[in-house]
Amino acid sequence: MNTPAPKKVVVGLSGGVDSSVAALLLKQQGYEVMGLFMKNWEDDDTEDYCSSRQDLIDAVSVADKIGIDIEQVNFSAEYKERVFSEFLTEYKAGRTPNPDVMCNAEIKFKAFLDHAMALGADWIATGHYAQVRERDGLFQLLRADDGSKDQSYFLYRLNQQQLSKTLFPLGNLTKIEVREIARREGLATHDKKDSTGICFVGERPFREFLNRYIPANPGDIVTPDGTGGDVRVGKHSGLMFYTLGQRQGLGIGGTRNGDGDAWYVAEKDMVNNRLVVVQGHDHASLFSDRVTAVNLNWISGVTPHCGWVYGAKTRYRQKDAPCVIASATQQSCAIEFAEPQWAVTPGQSVVVYESNVCLGGGIIESTAQSAAAAEAIRLRQESCT
């Protein structure tokens, strides 16, 4: 009797602890495991920042320890064309994109997936903290058991075909458990710090980096004077360097009228090249309860029901906020929140959930504040005085 060959899984080995343990667990579960190291950035890839050279060394070390083959592949051209060009376009338009969302959709689960399938893989796997479940013939993206590490927010653009070919071995583990497994098994990455910065580009000084690709255009920083006009309070170094809700790095000396409240970015006036700031974390200008989203992706292929209550988040670390989809077409949808949301930022993603199932979402195009929201903010501020 012939024993069936084990299923082949190609794991994206990044040189970090999460992907290392993902590969190890799959090997222990009896899969035929192969590692794939993706090099996706070549410009100024030096030791000064996040060098892929050290990451490759770590990935090879892990593959050798586990006893699997590893291949290096260069997706730099795909990254520049599909991710980085869009990244720059969004910043030029005054929006704040999320490179992790774009990178997952276009590189890790498209270019990488296509390459792995050409190698004869049955599945791909990554070290993301998320889960996949098949139910009634559809594949669902679920939150990870560890809510503090769940990364489904960054994966909402995946589709049925991608999810059907994806394994997330860490979905039921905590980060502490992952590091302990790596330490116990003698993996060199067990205490390696988590990567941050722009996806595949690394922890470069952001303003200096962005200024290489987009010319800075300094202008005025203004604040509303309460009578319909504005007061100049400083100079900005280029609207692309700021995001809504930003407090640090505004360069405004002191506070207006002797008031001790901090300044926050409330608007980027692209037409007049002005940065609009307000004082106080709870200033009404920083809140909105209606979001218009475009470039939608619903994982099941079906738009969620209008009028049903879902949960949604407009940034990664945010808790789900109750909302309804007020209207939807194939191109855009309007999402209304039960409570005003703070510093909702065009260019970022709004991601919709039903319990622990990620339904999908879209890119935030614009925000608005209803009369009811304005009244709720007013009453809240009155109760705090």
Image (tube, rainbow, N blue to C red):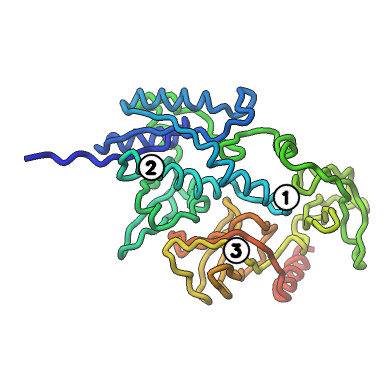
Q: Residue at x 76, y 43 (%)?
A: 248
The percent position of residue 190, horizontal first and vertical second, equals 44, 28
Q: Residue at x 16, y 41 (%)?
A: 4
Earlier residue among tags 2 and 3:
2
Whether residue 177 is visible, yes or no, is no
Q: CA distance from mark 1 to mark 3?
A: 18 Å
The percent position of residue 85, horizontal first and vertical second, equals 63, 46
Q: CA distance from mark 2 to mark 1?
A: 34 Å
Earlier residue among tags 1 and 3:
1
The quadrant in which the N terminus is found is: top left
Name which residue type carries label 3: Val
Local secondary structure at mark 2: strand
**Residue 369 versus residue 344 in the image, above or below:** below
Whether residue 140 is visible, yes or no, is yes
Question: Quick check: 221 left or right of 165?
Answer: right
Q: To which residue does mark 3 refer?
A: 294
> Which residue is more in the foreground, 308 or 59?
59
Local secondary structure at mark 1: helix
Q: Quadrant of residue 299?
A: bottom left
The percent position of residue 13, horizontal first and vertical second, equals 43, 34
**Residue 165 versus residue 283 in the image, above or below:** above
Local secondary structure at mark 3: strand
Number of numbered tags placed on the structure image = 3
Q: Residue at x 35, y 53 (%)?
A: 164
Question: Quick check: 289 left or right of 6?
Answer: right
Q: CA distance from mark 2 to mark 3?
A: 29 Å
Question: Quick check: 360 left or right of 219?
Answer: left
The percent position of residue 204, horizontal first and vertical second, equals 66, 33
Q: To which residue does mark 2 refer?
A: 125
Q: To which residue does mark 1 refer?
A: 92
Q: Are marks 1 and 3 in contact (CB under 8 Å)?
A: no
